[in-house]
Image (cartoon, grey):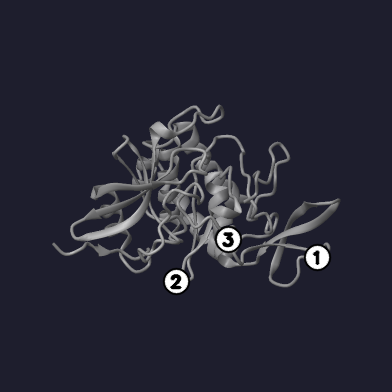
Amino acid sequence: MPAPERVPAPGVSATGELEELLARGELTVVGRIREASNAVLLCTVAYGGRSADCVYKPVKGERPLWDFPDGNLAQREVAAYLVSEATGWGLVPPTVLRDGPYGEGMVQLWIGPGDDGDDRDDGSGGDESGGDGSDGSGLLALVEGEEAGEGWKPVALADVGEGRTALLVHADDPRLRRLAVLDAVINNGDRKGGHLLPAPDGRLYGIDHGVSFHREDKLRTLLWGWAGEPLTDEAREVLTALAARLADGEPLATRLAELITPVELAAVRARVADLLRTGVHPQPSGQWPAIPWPPV
């Protein structure tokens, strides 16, 4: 029997085909990502002569969080993917909710090492989502002084030891800016550097969205460089279209209602409306730590 054809990352194959592969394929566990705070299993998935690497996060392996008592993290990961797809930006790898070897969980296409089948993690390290454990190489930096420099946006001063500080900056990159808008919509409480995955084809993906969609302001991110600045025309157009897709009875709203609570869905709508009303990127509220810890 011939080996299954390996599936490339999104942008080459149709997203719908990848979703079908992830949802219907046979999952085979090949390792565990030990550094993750919850159970994260590296798997292969095969269906109809096609295969891919993916991560599987079973609900049974989640540690309870006091401030996310409803639903589960896996559902929030899928909800983040659906909202990302609704924007048309494709910032989250294909993600589905399905049964697996250890019960229901989130299954997400692997982005990073392993795309070509030659360098999959064996469970000895990596980050929570099955990425390459990087900190978004080329997108984040620490610089001396108080000026970010051309092509960079300042975030905050960071303690680098021995009484020294450095300026944390991120690239003034349109891909990051789109991700900052998505994070504001889904209220991402944990946008770390290691959750930024540049793909070989030039696309950028964000991963690990389990602590998103809280009804209260929980936005914690390293992407504050545009805080208070006007949204781009593209972002306003995308948000206007997204608002329509979040209306009662629309397919996106109906699916999200199966994954998050009614109060949380109402909060998504309110955040989109607020972004359109103000026309600017949000700023830290001051009521919650603005930057996740650890930042990478």
Give residue 249's quadrant in the image. top left
Give the residue pinned by disc 3. Answer: 136
Badge 2 crowding class, 10 Å Cα cut-off, few under 14, some 14 to 19, many 20 or more, is few
Q: Mark 1 belongs to which amino acid? A: Glu
Label 3, residues with CA under 10 Å away: few <14, some 14-19, many ≥20:
many
Measured from the top left, where is residue 94 in percent x and y?
37, 54
Question: Which residue in the rendered view is the most extreme toward the right?
Answer: 163
User: In the image, residue 44 lies at what x, y percent?
Assistant: 31, 53
* Badge nearest the viewer, 3 or 1: 3
Q: Earlier in the sequence, mark 3 or mark 1?
A: 3
The kind of secondary structure element at disc 3 is loop
Tell me the quarter of the picture where residue 179 sits. Answer: bottom right
Where 110 sits versus 220, above or below?
below
| Kind of residue indicated by mark 2 | Asp
- Residue marked by disc 1: 147
Q: Nearer the viewer, residue 47 or 44?
A: 44
Q: CA distance from mark 1 to mark 2?
A: 31 Å
* Distance between mark 3 and mark 1 Cα atoms: 21 Å
Residue 57, compared with residue 145, is above or below; it is above
Whether residue 126 sits left or right of residue 122 in the image: it is right
Identified at 64% across, 45% down, the residue is 292
Quadrant in the rendering for residue 46: bottom left
Task: Answer whether labels 3 and 1 touch (C-beta < 8 Å).
Answer: no
Q: Earlier in the sequence, mark 1 or mark 2?
A: 1
Quadrant where the N terminus sits is bottom left
Report the residue marked by disc 2: 201
* Residue 182 x/y as whole percent: 53, 53
Cβ–Cβ below 8 Å for labels 1 and 2?
A: no
**Front-most of residues 119 and 160:** 119
Residue in view at x 48 percent, y 55 percent: 131
